[in-house]
Every structure is written in structure tokens, then in C-alpha cells.
Amino acid sequence: MVKKPAPDATRRSEKSRRAIYDAALALVAEAGYPKTTIEGIAARAGVGKQTIYRWWPSKADVLLEAFLDLSEQAARQAGQVPYEIPDTGDLAADLKAVLRATVDELLDPRFEAPSRALAAEGVVNEPLGREFVTKLLEPQLELYVRRLRAAQDTGAVRPDVDPRIALELFVSPLAQRWLQHTAPITHAYTDTLVDYALYGLVPR
């Protein structure tokens, strides 16, 4: 009698993990963060809730990991792993290109609901907020720092400018407008942010 191979526990775990990611992202998009529960995620994913609690302490942690995975998948599909802000020699064009891509992502329903949910929860859940900043936000901001430092090396940006503060001139207004719905976010808007940040407000 031929003995059947033992089930691959690693593959089974990865399949369950992927189903949990998909369920968490779908539920938060459909019902919002407050109504998304571990029980609901488990039912949607077809796993027991103890499976989820074995891997994550809370729904916030599930959602954070699912969102990070979604971002990595999107970058991989676009052939942008590891991702860097382009350096074409034209700083304004490079910043406008990456901010336009950011607008597209923020308006993509797959990203918008979990992004807002994590941002809102991070305000009241300090450990999650720190993890969100450390794992997702800071690596993205570091890309701007590296591009601005490269521009300093070529003389396109003043050597006395602090890149970490400078990037906030265009990243922070975009984040505020998106989070608070103060006005639409568009390519034209982020192009203008770059122009204002690089060339200032005084007559030229």
C-alpha cells in the first residue's frame, strides 16, 4: 500500500494566512473598522478564531499586517521591489511622479479603507500607531530623504536644507487633505505642492 504524503503544514498555514489577510481587508472596506471583528474575519476566511489569535493579538494587528502585505504585493506587481524614487536628474519631475502615484494609491478602494482605518486607530491605540509609523510610514519617508540628499549632491537643493523637514512641505499637506477630506486630492494638487515647496511663494 502506497503511503500518502503528510499534509504540508507550511503550505496550509500560508493559505490560511492569505485568506485571513483578504478577509480583514474586505471586511474593513465593507463595514468599517469598528464593525470589523476577529469573529467576522475568521468566518470570512473559513478558519477558527483561535487560529487568528495564535498569530495576532488583535484585529488591529491583523489589519496592519494585511495592509503591509497588500502594499508589498502591489510594489512587486509593478516591478518596484525594492522601490526607490526615480532619479532622472529632474527633482521636480521625480517628486511629481511619485506623488501622483501616491494619489492613485490613496484613491484606490483596496488601499483607502484599510489606510483610513489604521490611521484612525493609530491615534487612540499608541502601540499600533508607532508600529504603523515604523513599519510603513518611515520607510516611505526615507525614500524622499535619499532623493533630496541626492539632489543636494548635485546642487539642485541647498546644502543647508534638512531633507526630513523639507519632505513635509509636500507630504504632510497631502496627508492632511486626504485624512480630513478638506478638499479633493488630485495630480494637479500634488504638482502644485511640489512647485510651492521647491520654488517658494515669493515672486521670481
Image (cartoon, helix red, strand yellow):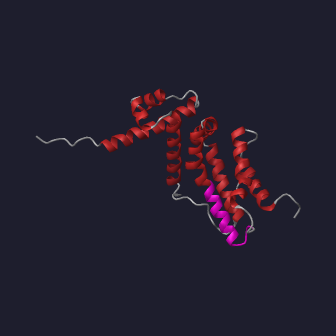
Horizontal arrangement in the rendering, residue 101 relative to residue 180 (left or right): left
In magenta stretch: residue 31: no
Going 58% across and 42% down the picture, which residue do you hit?
111
For the point 67% across and 69% down, the residue is 89
The residue that appears at 49% across and 46% down in the rendered structure is 69
Question: Looking at the picture, how far across and down is residue 170, in whole percent?
Answer: 73, 53
- Which residue, as the protein is rendered here, is positioned at the far right? 203
148 inside magenta stretch: yes
150 to the left or right of 198 = left
Quarter of the view holding residue 127: top right
Pick out the residue farthest to the left: 1
In the picture, the quarter occupied by the N terminus is top left
Outermost residue, bottom direction? 154
Kindly report the secondary structure that dominates the magenta region of the rendered protein.
helix
Residue 159 in picture, x, y percent from top left: 73, 69
Residue range highlighted in magenta: 141-157
**Residue 186 visible in this rendered orientation of the protein:** no
Residue 184 percent across, percent down from the top left = 73, 42
For the residue pair 145 and 94, the one nearer the viewer reads as: 145
Along the viewing direction, whichever of 183 and 175 lies nearer the viewer: 175
- Snapshot quadrant of residue 94: bottom right
